[in-house]
Amino acid sequence: MNDQSLISRANLLAQMASNRTVTTDVLADQERQFVESRLVGPPPVERLDKSEAPAFVFTNQKRGIGLGSKRNTTAPDSDRGTVVVVTGRRILCLVGTEPDDEVVEIPIESIAAATAHTGLLANRLEIRTPRKAYHIWTDRNTDDVLAAAAEFIADRMFDDPEELARRDGANRITYRGQSIDQTPDNTPSQATPADDPGGDPSSVDGD
């Protein structure tokens, strides 16, 4: 796809979207505040299927994506950023890192819960599958759309969500009300409240 076709498709998808988070610049990865681009690899619009349209697009420049707990993050390089595209099929998380972007994909059929959190210093969308958790940090200007995004996802969730088979560092189970992260050898290690304050939906995101 050449630059003109890319921008044309990004512009069409932005016009089709019903909220302000979907913009041509982000979809085409041509935001002015980035000297090169937010991502290293292809822009978000090129990663979408032909019949796939974004309903919400969230960004952050430093925080990246929390895997399992809020503090276990996959963060972008210092001159890059993160883009998260929510469609009716999946949540596509793109973290700008050299030499290849980190890509985390969460199919709608695997999602068990979606919760919006707004805090004094940070906002995030918390996505849970039966045994995994993802914390999607968003820019501060998303207070009015996070709940709508969570509702959009919840409306499309399956009654019996399928667990994700791939190992992406987001494994997590619960034991006696406490969050437990799964280590690579499948030995659970209990997380402290400081490691994962996101287990309580009423917690304030102040960090």
Image (cartoon, rainbow, N blue to C red):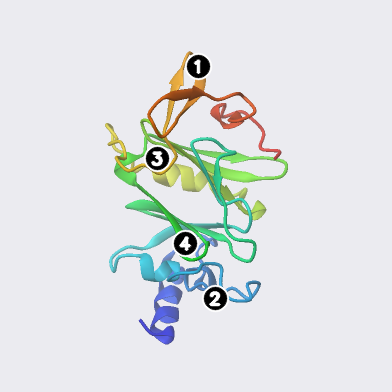
Please report whichever mark, 4 or 1, sits nearer to the chain's N-terminal start: 4
| Among the two numbered marks 4 and 2 on one chain, the one whose residue lies closer to the N terminus | 2
At which x and y percent is residue 74?
A: 53, 49
Residue type, label 1: Gly
Q: How many marks?
A: 4
- The answer to which quarter of the image holds residue 11 is bottom left
Residue 30 is labelled as 2
Q: Which circle, 1 or 3, is nearer the viewer? A: 1
Q: Nearer the viewer, mark 4 or mark 2?
A: 4
Q: Who is closer to the viewer here, 39 or 145?
A: 39
Quarter of the N terminus within the rendering? bottom left
Q: Which residue is mark 3?
A: 154
Chain-order first, disc 2 or disc 1: 2
Q: CA distance from mark 4 to mark 1?
A: 35 Å
Q: Are marks 2 and 1 in contact (CB under 8 Å)?
A: no
* Kind of residue indicated by mark 4: Asp
Q: Which mark is residue 75?
A: none
Q: Is 139 located above or below residue 170 in the figure?
A: below
Q: Nearer the viewer, mark 2 or mark 3?
A: 2
Give the number of the mark in front: 3 or 4. Answer: 4
Q: Residue at x 35, y 65 (%)?
A: 48
